[in-house]
Image (cartoon, rainbow, N blue to C red):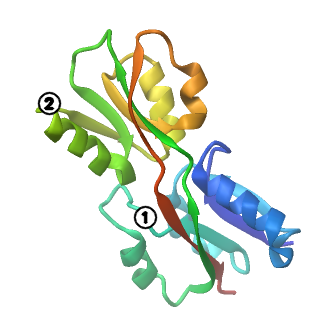
Amino acid sequence: MPAIHTLGPRETDSYLAAQGLTDEDPVYQHFSIQLHHDFSSIYENLGNYHGDYFLVPVGYQGPAGDTWTSQHYAHWQELIIKKTWSTKTMEMLLVENTEQSNSKSVSHRTTKTLLQEFAEQNDLPVQIDYVPAKPLAADAFLSGNYQYAIFSQNAEKKLQQHHRILARFQPEMIWCLYQIKS
């Protein structure tokens, strides 16, 4: 049975999109979902996944400055678009640790614009460290070393009294499901 390769952990929008696909579309109902630490490793190992599927948001931005568009063109001979659709992301939170004043922030690359806009509007310097998934931004923020972060709302229950929610966001995302050529 084919697998759908996408970003993990289970708390990511990618996993929720893959789960929605296997729950709602009879064509993909019996597919397994294989979670990866980052999208880059999936792109690098496409040759190991012949016949499987790859789910990626078109908002993808990789650690080397690559994007969905650049990867789409780089791998056009290995990937076939099978389906595209849009869904709202999980609600995202911009949070502050009021016990920290180091201007350090943690974010996924795709949400850096939201963080930078906040910093500019409030005339705040921010130094941004990037992680491959929003749940990892939540984990890093909750460790106490960061003043600001953006991560998905499903981590809100882990916030403490000295954490303050500054803004909430819930944009739409377009998803691209590829089949990896045999």
In this rendering, the answer to whether 50 lies above or below 22 is below
- Residue 136 disc label: none
Distance from the alpha carbon under mark 1 to that under mark 2: 26 Å
In-image side of 70 versus 158 (left or right): left
Residue depicted at 59% across the width and 85% down the height: 81
Q: Which residue is mark 2?
A: 124
| Residue 148, quarter of picture | top left
In this rendering, the answer to whether 169 lies above or below 64 is above
Q: For mark 1, give the secondary structure.
A: loop
Q: Quadrant of the C terminus?
A: bottom right
Q: Which residue is mark 1?
A: 59
Q: For mark 2, give the secondary structure.
A: loop
Q: Can you give x and y, in whole percent of width and height, for residue 96 in the image?
A: 34, 23
Q: Residue furthest bottom?
A: 77
* Label 1: how many Cα within 10 Å (few below 14, some 14–19, many 20+): some
* Label 2: how many Cα within 10 Å (few below 14, some 14–19, many 20+): few
In-image side of 80 versus 31 (left or right): left
Q: Can you give x and y, in whole percent of width and height, for residue 167 in the image?
A: 38, 35
Count of marks overlaid on the render: 2
Label whose residue precedes the other's in the sequence (1 or 2) = 1
> What amino acid type should be assigned to the residue bearing mark 2?
Leu
Residue depicted at 36% across the width and 76% down the height: 70
Q: Can you give x and y, in whole percent of width and height, for residue 44 in the image?
A: 51, 67
Q: Can you give x and y, in whole percent of width and height, for residue 114 in the image?
A: 31, 46
In this rendering, the answer to whether 41 lies above or below 46 is above
| Residue 179, quarter of picture | bottom right
Look at the numbered discs 1 and 2 and tell me whether their residues touch, using CB distance below 8 Å.
no
> What amino acid type should be assigned to the residue bearing mark 1?
Gly
Q: Quadrant of the N terminus?
A: bottom right
* Circle nearer the viewer, 1 or 2: 2
Viewer-side residue, 144 vs 45: 144
Residue depicted at 48% across the width and 82% down the height: 75
